[in-house]
Image (cartoon, rainbow, N blue to C red):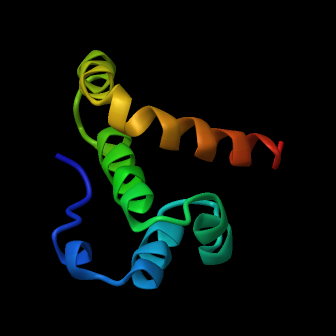
Amino acid sequence: MGYDFTDEANLTDDQLAGELAKLTPLTIDEITDILPEKVDKEHFKQLIDIVRSAESQNDKLVLFKDNVEKLGGVALTVLGKLLKFV
């Protein structure tokens, strides 16, 4: 599907933030600030995986819709932070 996060599954919270920072315009500190809990970072990586997948836009929307309760809060938090850059 998209980026394989298998290796990251065993990373510490800080290491996970570092891996996420490589895939976004956010710094490690910004990721840690807006997503303080490891579970939030894990949800963020699931969201990134959906966005970066080779699936069609419609299939990505279905995946997001199926997981909106889990991923929606993280999506809004990250989008809110990114909009401050604009």
Query: Along the horizontal axis of the image, is 23 left or right of 59?
Result: right
Q: Reply above or below: 23 against 68.
A: below
Picture quadrant where residue 51 is located: top left
Q: Reply above or below: 54 against 64.
A: below
Q: In x, y percent, where is residue 50?
A: 30, 40
Q: Residue at x 37, y 44 (%)?
A: 47
Query: Along the horizontal axis of the image, is 39 left or right of 20?
Result: left
Query: Along the horizontal axis of the image, is 79 left or right of 54?
Result: right
Q: Residue at x 29, y 15 (%)?
A: 58
Q: Reply above or below: 63 against 5.
A: above
Q: In x, y percent, where is residue 70?
A: 34, 37
Q: Residue at x 28, y 30 (%)?
A: 67
Q: In x, y percent, where is residue 41?
A: 43, 61
Q: How many marks?
A: 0
Q: In x, y percent, where is residue 29?
A: 66, 76
The front one of 55 and 41 is 41
The front one of 17 and 22 is 17
Position of the C terminus, as image quadrant, is top right
Q: Reply above or below: 18 against 55.
A: below
The front one of 33 and 79 is 33
* Residue sticking out furthest to the front: 37
Q: Residue at x 48, y 79 (%)?
A: 18
